[in-house]
């Protein structure tokens, strides 16, 4: 465990409109005979242009909350509104639609398609969003340039370094201009130097007005956020500014 | 709508990339379909060939000719009911013709009597035995479906004066007179000299059983003189005026025959009226049965191929579970994932189908080249059908794994290693 970061005054930003509103959300899993209470009643609001870290030991419900926020999963009970849409009652394809338009995912293991080049990987959400091909190419190329991969556009994932792969993944998350970027341990598979570079990229995206949610167990990563939510045993233990 | 097109395009791309990336696996899987398609299409060509051969054989009998025999052609299980029927006699034909001539509204044109047996024919020390020898009237010329390569049939005068003339079937003429014309030559039949009057063009065999080329035709008068009439195989051939009214003609002929025979009402016919169309009616269900059984058995091999496709699609889904999770996270809907794997399965099947068709065509060409008369037939319809079958096989074998993939929970799929 690294020691807590030195307290440092940060400018308080004007509060944006509400993006996510969660109230009394629970999630139960049936594991054979046993019922697991992954979330026991979580309430939470996230506004535009927040930079939020979700922390907690394994088994705390961190992953479940992340899946919920990412609209990959729906709550057993409770209310979840995303930009005013009632997500809790949505079926698979409606959730897919929300994920496509509103959420940019960044995974620990990058999850790029191995046989497609960077451009094609970045284009994927636009294909599912029904964007015509010339516009797709243009937007994907621009985002790749924005994340610093202008000279790697036609490289396949196995021709890229870990950091570059994660940049492709971030470009893919950004390309549909989502309401939130949801990153799950984005530096978990990177060496520390590359990790710092990726976190700097997140800082930059935040400065440009993006809403970022990072799920991590590393304090050094969470320190980049402006707000930290700590989970324990399926409940929010603390929710406050990151200092 | 546009989105479906983009997704379709993407799915085809992925499928092609996937097949390219797993060349060996895809080829082996496609092989199952190749074998299945080859088996089914070969069976298809064989069935089409059988149909054509069958129709060709029936055409030899004449579409507008009815045959009066002692026995029905289509088989008599209770033969003892037929055995003591009186044989057909030349006089029956004469009486029929007299009635037909007296009734202008008749559906029938004329009747001609014939008898047949096997005999040998000799020329210049060469001999052909077992030749089907028919004795008939000059009117037979208007029933005969074959052309003459040279010469003609005997006329009425030659028939009535029992002139010793003969018309040879193609093979008989070839055997006795290789490379030259037999017209005017004297051959020996039953120890008697006969002058060759004509040679029939090649006709082939009837259902592969009886060769129309291994025959000779004599005037009934001469035939009767030397062979006599063998009662059991006699036949009266009746030409019909309008082949579209065959049923009416058959009714009329049955009535006339009963009159000729002096049968009273309530008595069963003591003769059988036969014909190609009736034959066809009887044989069609058998033909369909053969086609069905053949396609079923060969269809099984295609089924095995389909199971291979299904298996490989399951493997493909399993291998790419994480990719499916990623795609779903990025907004792929159920339909998109379903389509992706379905198209992959269909692509392999269509690939197999195309290769199978090419192989079938190759085999067909080889067989046709080696045995021109072998009844097989390769049709464009067959190409269309087998492509449709390939696509259907792909869809049917891919649907279960693809459906499973489309229903995967993205959370579970993303966690899959």
Image (spheres, helix red, strand yellow):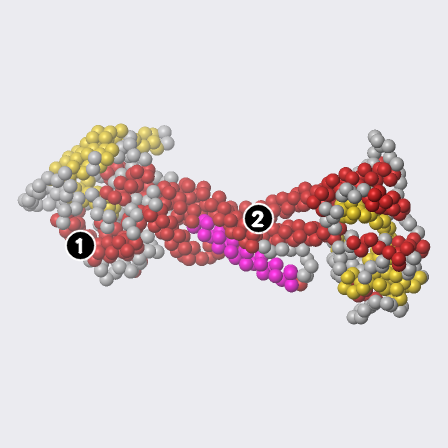
Q: Is residue B359 magenta?
A: yes
Main SS category, magenta section: helix
Quadrant location of the N terminus of chain A in the rendered image: top left
Q: Tell which of A91 and B285 is nearer to you.
A: B285
- Residue at point 85% right, 49% down? B113
Residue on which the image places disc 1: A197
Element carrying mark 1: helix
Q: Tell which of A85 and A151 is nearer to you.
A: A85
Return the x and y of residue B356 as percentages of the image width and height.
54, 55
Q: Tell which of A190 and B323 is nearer to you.
A: B323
Q: Which mark is residue B301?
A: 2
From the viewer's perspective, tell me whether residue B329 is left or right of residue B232.
Answer: left
Element carrying mark 2: helix
Q: Is residue B26 magenta?
A: no
Circle 2 chain: B
From the viewer's perspective, tell me whether residue B397 is left or right of residue B409.
Answer: right
- Residue at point 25% right, 44% down? A101
Residue interval drawn in magenta: B344-369
């Amino acid at each position: 465990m690294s020691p807590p970061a030195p307290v440092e005054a940060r400018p308080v930003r004007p509060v944006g409109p509400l993006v996510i509103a969660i109230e009394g959300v629970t999630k139960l899993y049936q594991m054979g005979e046993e019922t697991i209470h992954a979330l026991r009643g979580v309430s939470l609001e996230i506004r535009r242009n927040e930079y939020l870290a979700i922390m907690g030991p394994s088994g705390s419900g961190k992953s479940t909350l992340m899946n919920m926020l990412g609209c990959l999963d729906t709550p057993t009970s409770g209310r979840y509104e995303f930009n005013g849409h009632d997500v809790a009652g949505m079926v698979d394809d409606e959730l897919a639609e929300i994920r496509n338009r509103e959420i940019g995912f960044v995974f620990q293991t990058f999850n790029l398609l191995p046989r497609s080049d960077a451009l094609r990987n970045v284009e994927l959400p636009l294909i599912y969003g029904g964007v015509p091909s010339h516009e797709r190419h243009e937007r994907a190329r621009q985002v790749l340039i924005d994340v610093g991969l202008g000279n790697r556009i036609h490289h396949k994932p196995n021709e890229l370094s870990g950091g570059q792969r994660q940049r492709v993944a971030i470009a893919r998350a950004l390309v549909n201009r989502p309401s939130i970027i949801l990153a799950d341990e984005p530096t978990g598979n990177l060496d520390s130097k590359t990790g710092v570079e990726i976190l700097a990229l997140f800082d930059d995206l935040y400065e440009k007005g993006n809403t970022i949610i990072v799920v991590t167990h590393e304090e050094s990563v969470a320190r980049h956020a402006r707000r930290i939510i700590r989970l324990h045993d399926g409940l929010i233990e603390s929710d406050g500014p990151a200092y | 709508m546009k989105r479906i097109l983009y997704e379709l395009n993407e799915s085809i791309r992925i499928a092609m990339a996937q097949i390219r990336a797993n060349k060996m696996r895809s080829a082996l899987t496609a092989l199952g379909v190749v074998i299945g398609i080859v088996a089914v299409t070969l069976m298809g060509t064989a069935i089409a060939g059988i149909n054509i051969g069958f129709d060709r054989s029936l055409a030899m009998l004449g579409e507008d000719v009815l045959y009066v025999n002692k026995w029905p052609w289509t088989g008599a299980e209770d033969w003892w009911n037929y055995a003591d029927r009186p044989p057909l006699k030349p006089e029956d034909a004469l009486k029929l013709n007299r009635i037909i001539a007296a009734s202008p509204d008749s559906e029938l044109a004329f009747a001609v009597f014939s008898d047949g047996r096997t005999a040998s024919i000799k020329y210049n020390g060469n001999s052909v035995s077992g030749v089907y020898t028919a004795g008939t009237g000059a009117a037979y010329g208007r029933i005969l479906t074959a052309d003459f390569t040279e010469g003609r049939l005997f006329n009425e005068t030659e028939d009535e004066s029992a002139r010793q003339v003969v018309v040879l079937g193609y093979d008989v003429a070839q055997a006795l007179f290789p490379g030259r014309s037999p017209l005017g030559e004297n051959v020996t039949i039953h120890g008697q000299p006969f002058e060759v009057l004509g040679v029939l063009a090649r006709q082939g065999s009837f259902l592969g059983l009886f060769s129309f080329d291994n025959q000779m035709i004599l005037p009934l008068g001469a035939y009767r003189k030397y062979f006599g009439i063998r009662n059991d195989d006699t036949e009266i051939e009746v030409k019909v005026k309008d082949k579209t009214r065959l049923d009416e003609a058959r009714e009329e002929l049955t009535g006339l025959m009963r009159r000729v025979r002096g049968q009273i009402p309530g008595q069963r016919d003591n003769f059988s009226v036969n014909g190609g169309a009736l034959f066809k009616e009887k044989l069609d269900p058998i033909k369909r049965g053969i086609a069905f059984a053949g396609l079923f058995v060969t269809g099984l091999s295609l089924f095995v191929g389909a199971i291979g496709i299904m298996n490989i699609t399951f493997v493909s889904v399993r291998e790419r579970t994480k990719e499916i999770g990623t795609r779903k996270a990025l907004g792929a809907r159920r339909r998109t994932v379903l389509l992706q794997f379905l198209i992959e399965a269909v692509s392999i099947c269509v690939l197999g189908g195309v290769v199978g068709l090419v192989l079938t065509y190759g085999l067909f060409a080889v067989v046709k080249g080696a045995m021109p008369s072998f009844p097989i037939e390769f049709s464009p319809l067959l190409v269309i059908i087998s492509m449709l079958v390939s696509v259907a096989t792909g869809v049917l074998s891919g649907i279960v794994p693809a459906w499973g993939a489309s229903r995967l929970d993205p959370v579970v799929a993303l966690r899959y290693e």
